[in-house]
Amino acid sequence: FSSASEATSRWGVDDVVDAFAVHGACGVWGLLAVGLFDRGGGLLPTGSGRLLGSQALGALVLAALGCGGAAAAAGTLRWLGVLRVSREQEESGLDSEFGLKAYSRNNDVLQRCRTVSALLSENGFSALDLFDALVSLRGVVYRTFTPQAADHKLEGEVKDILQHLSYDSLGGQDGRPHLAFLSHHKADAGDAARIFVDTARRLLASQPFLESAGLGPRAEEAVRRVKPQDLVWLDSTNLKELPTLLDVVASSCNHILFLTRAALERPWVLAELVAAHTLGKYVCLVLLEWPGATEERLREFQFPAALERTIHEWAWFLSKEAPARHKRDGEGELRRRVTTAASSWHTSASADSSHHIRRTPSEDARFSRQLPLTAMSLGPAGPRSGKAAKRVPLPSVALQRPESYKASVSSLAEEE
C-alpha cells in the first residue's frame, strides 16, 4: 500500500483516497499471495508455480476488465468534451457544485491566502515574504495587555512594553518620527488599542517614567523632541490607503502587533507585518487578555497554537501555488525552506519547553541562541540581540530615514 500510494503521488495521479493503492495494489498482492503461500499448491510450500501462474493470469484478466471498461467510458466522455471540469470548478471543489462543503475550511484558507497574496503583490511583497515574517514571530517574546485591568496593573503592563522597545533611531534629522506603529484588528482590539495608545502617550510625557525606565539621556531627549501624538501611531488613524500606512511603518522605530483571534487573518495587518519584518523593525507581540469575561475571552489569541496554525496554512498555500518569481530558488529549495520552517518549532519546543511563557529580558538573549537555525535565518532574532536578519542588511536601514517603504525595499534589493 505504501509503495503504491507513493508511486501515484510521484506520477502525478490525482487519487485523493488512495483507491488504487487499497483496491488495486493490495488486491493484486492478495491474489499473488495465495499463489505463493497456499499450503496445497503455493510456490513456496510445494515448489510448484502452477497456482501462482493461475493467480497472476486472473489478476491480469481482472485488470483488463476494469481498465478496459474505464478507458472506454473515459474516452467517450473526453470525446464529448465533458471528462474534466473547468479550472475554477476544480479549485473550488466539485462538492461546491452540489451545494456541499466537504472541504470548506481548505477552500476558505485558499481564498483568504490568495486575497492576501494579491494584496502583498500590489505593494511590492510576496507570500513567501509573509511566510518568513510569520516564522520569525516564533522567536519573539510576547508581552500581555489587559485593557479592563485596574489602573496600576494597566500602567505596569504598558510600561513593560515601552521599556522593551528600541529608541536608538527616534527623532533628530536622521531619525524616525514615530517610536512605534501599533497594528491591530479593529473589530476585536479597537477599544484596547485606544486605551494602550492613550496610556503610552501619557507615560512617555511623564518625567518620572523616563527616569525610571532607564532609557538613557539620548533616548529621553529624543522622546521629548517628538510630539506625544506622533510617538505611537495607531493604524486605524488612516484606513483608506494601505501604502500610506506602510509609509508610517517604514518611518517607525518599532512595530507593535496586538494579537487577537483573527489578527493574523486580516490582510492589512499581515501587510504591515511583512513591511516591518522586511525593513528589520523590532516586532513586539502583545497578547490581549480579558480574564473572567467569558464572551470577551473569545477574542483572545491562543499562543502558540494559533501562530503555528497560520504558519502551516501558508506553508500549505506556498506548496500548492508557489509564485513564479520564486522559481529562481528552485522548486526543491522552496519546498525545503517551507517544510523545514514549518516543522522546526516542534524540534525547538522539546529543547525549550518555555517557548509559550513570558521571559525576563535577561532570558531573551539566551532563548534567541536556542532558536532553530531556520527561524533565525528567516528573520530578526529579537530586541538588542545584535543578530541581523539574513535576508535584510539591517545596519543600512537603521542609518537611513526612508521616504517610503517602497524606496526602502528597492534599496535593500539593490544592496542584495
Image (cartoon, rainbow, N blue to C red):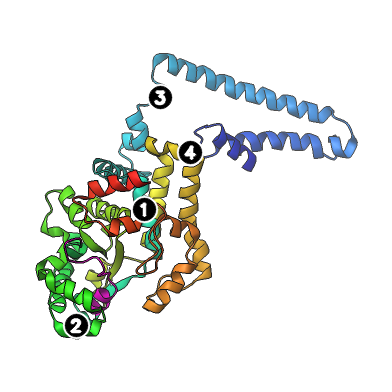
Does the magenta stretch mainly form a helix, a strand or a loop? loop
Residue type for callout 3: Arg
Residue under the image location 68 percent in, 33 percent down: 28
Residue 150 visible in the current orientation: no
Q: Depth check: give the residue in front, 112 or 1.
A: 112
Quick check: 156 left or right of 32? Answer: left
Tag 1: residue type? Val
100 and 227: which is toward the camera: 227
Provide the residue designation for mark 2: 209
Q: Secondary structure at mark 2?
A: helix
**Magenta includes 50?**
no
- Look at the numbered discs 1 and 2 and tell me whether their residues touch, using CB distance below 8 Å: no
Q: What amino acid type should be assigned to the residue bearing mark 2?
A: Phe
Viewer-side label of 2, 4: 2
Q: CA–CA distance between discs 2 and 4?
A: 52 Å
**Label 3 SS:** loop
Residue 161 sits inside the magenta stretch = yes
| Residue 84 disc label | 3
The amino acid on which the numbered mark 4 sits, given as a three-letter code, is Glu
Residue 411 drawn at (x, y percent): 29, 47
Where does residue 295 sit, x and y in percent of width and height?
A: 22, 69
Asked whether disc 1 touches disc 3, contact meaning CB atoms under 8 Å apart, the reply is no
**Cα–Cα span, label 1 and label 3:** 45 Å
Mark whose residue sits in front, 4 or 1:
1
The image quarter in which residue 107 lies: top left
Give, as a single range, the part of the protein colored magenta.
157-174
